[in-house]
Image (cartoon, rainbow, N blue to C red):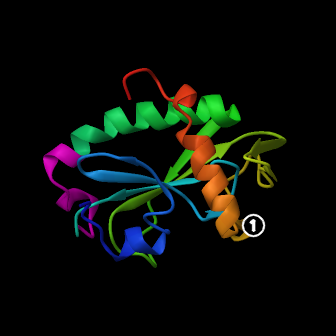
């Protein structure tokens, strides 16, 4: 059984789960700011980045490599933004936004990066329907998007 906290549940776990790591869960963000927006949430109850166990910090290198390769293949992003906000949802987590000029499509959902090339506009997010979440999770879990052995 995965260890989950309230922040993980808020982002639609388990339906939004893409990958399960020892210390982290990688999930589709139910409100997409750009196509392929993700949440990377620590499984622990830590509310400060520095309070995570050393293994969680070490694991980030593996996870960022995995997700960047996957998103490069899925949406051909030009930049990627990692935001650790933790203002509303207190447990350690990152919002991950692939950034690009123009529009990208994942599982039939097309989105423009409306704030390109500036900071992401979090208020412009598109809430996904349950069917869109299911389709996008399936598309982003596609093995051909992930590096071999992941």
- Counting labels gives 1
Furthest toward the top, the residue is: 148
Q: Residues within 10 Å of mark 1 (few under 14, many from 20)?
A: some
Magenta-drawn stretch contains 112: no
Q: Is residue 49 magenta?
A: yes
The residue that appears at 23% across and 38% down in the rendered structure is: 58
For the residue pair 143 and 42, the one nearer the viewer reads as 143
Please indicate whether residue 112 sits to the left or right of residue 58 in the image. right
Residue 122 seen anywhere in this rendered image of the structure: no
Q: Nearer the viewer, residue 99 or 20?
A: 20
Q: Which residue is mark 1?
A: 124
| Residue 134 placement: quadrant | bottom right
Identify whether 13 is placed above or below 145: below
Which residue is painted at 65% across and 68% down in the image? 130
Q: Position of residue 62 (x, y in %)?
A: 33, 33
Q: Position of residue 32 (x, y in %)?
A: 67, 60
For numbered disc 1, what is the local secondary structure?
helix
Image quadrant in which the C terminus is located: top left
- Placement of 72 over or under 47, stated as above or below: above
In the image, taking residue 45 as reference, residue 118 lies left or right, namely: right
Position of 90 compared to 38: left or right? left
Please identify the quarter of the rendering in which residue 86 is found. bottom left
Q: Residue at x 69, y 60 (%)?
A: 132
Q: Position of residue 10 (x, y in %)?
A: 46, 75
Image coordinates of residue 126 in percent, x first then y, are 73, 66
Residue that sits furthest to the left in the current view: 54
Location of the N terminus (image quadrant): bottom left
Q: Is residue 65 above or below residue 107?
A: above
What span is in magenta? Answer: 46-56
User: Taking the image as drawn, is residue 62 in sight?
Assistant: yes
């Amino acid at each position: 059984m995965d260890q989950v906290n309230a922040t993980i549940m808020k982002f639609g776990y388990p339906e939004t789960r893409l990958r399960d790591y020892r210390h982290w869960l990688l999930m589709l963000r139910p409100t997409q700011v750009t196509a392929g927006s993700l949440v990377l949430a620590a499984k622990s109850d830590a509310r400060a980045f520095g309070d995570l166990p050393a293994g969680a910090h070490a694991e980030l290198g593996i996870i960022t490599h995995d997700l960047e390769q996957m998103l490069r293949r899925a949406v051909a992003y030009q930049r990627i933004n990692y935001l650790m906000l933790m203002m509303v949802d207190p447990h350690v987590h990152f919002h991950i936004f692939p950034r690009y000029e123009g529009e990208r499509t994942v599982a039939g959902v097309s989105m423009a990066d409306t704030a390109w090339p500036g900071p992401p506009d979090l208020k412009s997010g598109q809430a996904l329907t349950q069917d869109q979440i299911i389709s996008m999770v399936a598309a982003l879990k596609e093995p051909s998007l992930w590096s071999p052995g992941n």
